[in-house]
Amino acid sequence: MAESTQMLLSTDLVPAHGTRIQWIFSTNNTECGHLLEEIKCARCSPNAQVLFHSLDMDKMPHREPDLPRLCQDFCREFYYTCRGHIPELFQADVDEFCQYYGRRDSSLCFPDFQRKKPQTQDSNYLGDVDIESISRKHKHNCYCAQEVLSGLRQPVAVVHCGDGSQRLFVLEREGIVRILNHDLELIKEPFLDIHKLVQSGLKGGDERGLLSLAFHPNYKKNGKLYVSYTTNQERWAIGPHDHILRVVEYTISRKNPNQVDTRTVRVLMEVAELHRKHLGGQLLFGPDGLLHIVLGDGMITLDDMEEMDGLSDFTGSVLRVDVDTDCCTSPYSIPRDNPYFNSTNQPPEIFAHGIHDPGRCALDRLQRDNGSLLMLCTDASGKNTSAGRILEITKGKDYENEPSVYDLQSTGGAPLVGGFIYRGCQSRRLYDSYVFGDRNGNLRILQKSTMSASTSDEQWQEKPLCLGSASSCGSTLVGHILGFGEDELGEVYILASSKSMVQSHSGKLYKLVDPKRPHAPKECQRQVEPPELLMTACSRHCKNGHCTPIGKCCCSPGWEGPFCRVAKCEPACRNGGVCMEPNKCLCKSGYSGGQCEKSERGMPNDQEKDGILDHIIDMTSYLLDLSSYIV
């Protein structure tokens, strides 16, 4: 953190101790209030001296800190929950805030000081169960693929929204997202249906269609989600590109938490692409709250690059975008320096590049000792090769030259399909393993192993993931692997389809199950929270604009006010006229013109009419101003 930011947090934000305590612990928001009440209890702990001690106390011994040292996960939750209700406290971004108030070393932090420290890394597993006795009950050493849902039309991904509802969202390539509730029952109405916008292909190797869905980290509060898909080139008439890869923002419906309000669409980014393979398009949020966009190389050749300068600026890259922006920019503003890229915000940061054909990336749920997170991506080793590789994505790296985590030379000509680093509670032996596969249905895992007792260096080792037969598991995975998914508890799911593309509804969803584990370990038994209606003030009242993820109503052109309900006339209405619609004035009697600038006074028998109309206009102006404050 910069020195100026440290001073902002430690001095500028800190009035007299008693004064600050009063407003820090005052909020009308229930969820934020609950977190603040928990924090207040930390002062009653026998560890309070450690929790509230800061190195800055040595510089300012006269001030007693009012926030304890926060654990990193709790710090981010506290920031996103209370930021909009105590703005005086959150004048830095989440990383700077948590760098100052978060735990910087292995010392105690809130609220982990109340929890019993785990004795092993696998603390989320049953400690009172004899694992060996459970294993002896099973004759095979394989995992099971339990069929959850069938009849899907080319499923491509499975995600969860992280709001405690334990719902699963299944993406179908043609542009439909369906919901499975916490009992894995399919909800009839789709969550999102944009099939009229999506340009998809059915031929083998054609990757166009609905590509990815990512929920905002603060989705429970702001209802924001992000979708990537391919569409036609109607609006982009320039250039020989085949299609456009588009990234958009939607907001959940205010009336139904199981449906998206498609009227809230906001285009974030568009990239013109030449070919129908190596598209990528995956979206995922990092621990920094930024949206990562993974783009393939689009099979662009050197000739393509020379012919169309600027086309390859963003292909083959992992981009990073700040969606929590306060700016209210107009969509479809094509930058002059690159006719093949369009962004409604500032151009995205190129996080890493040199990627060819990413088969999905995964962020590890578990934070490393140095505070970073592990991102693994499957990829092709080159533009025209079937050899696969697994990359550990790090900021600023060029993966044309960087070594891979693991190279797979024999994939049988099938592209790799990326999976997840298993952090679930059902399988102890699968924990910490990276689960992935190839399109032909071969499942694999990567596990870290120490090279020797004298060194701490680790290498990833590949192992096949054996699936049991239908007789031992009740069902077995058959066909092409299309993708992987993960639920809120960290359990892994597999999407597959028939090897025959003629059967359009042959997609199936499987759950990876370890038969050597109990059916329902108590660590997995979490209370289900029903999805809630979006109740933010912005979502209720923002009329002529859209809500940003931080809860600000961004007005459409011609509107202003806290919730975009006040029309704006430029130039302003004159002679007592009222702006009723953008650039449209309602004039008092005796005046006319676009801004009521023309006088028509002197007409006989008009005084009485003028008085009544003036009164009406004055009352209208008063009511418009009053309503803008009431809402």
Image (tube, rainbow, N blue to C red):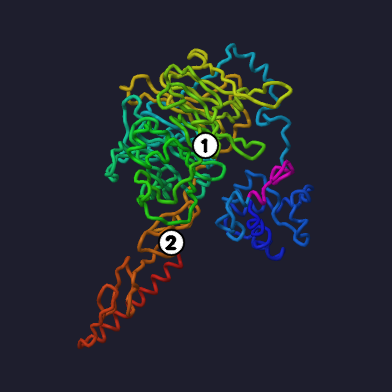
Residue 517 in which image quadrant: top right
Q: Which mark is residue 166?
A: 1
Q: Which mark is residue 563?
A: 2
Left or right: 469 as drawn, with respect to 587: right
Q: Is residue 108 magenta?
A: yes
Mark 1 vs 2: CB contact within 8 A: no
Q: Position of residue 212 (x, y in %)?
A: 43, 36
Residue 434 in which image quadrant: top right
Residue at point 48%, 38% (across, down) = 318
Residue at point 59%, 37% (across, down) = 373
Q: Position of residue 213 (x, y in %)?
A: 44, 39
What residue type is disc 1 on?
Gln
Residue at point 68%, 61% (across, down) = 11
Q: Position of residue 630 (x, y in %)?
A: 46, 67
Judging depth in this view, the residue of 456 and 462 nearest the camera is 456
Q: Which mark is residue 517?
A: none
- Our reading of the magenta stretch's main secondary structure is loop
Left or right: 127 as drawn, with respect to 222: right
Magenta span of residues = 98-113
Which badge, 1 or 2, comes first in the chain's sequence? 1
Q: Secondary structure at mark 1?
A: loop
Q: Secondary structure at mark 2?
A: loop
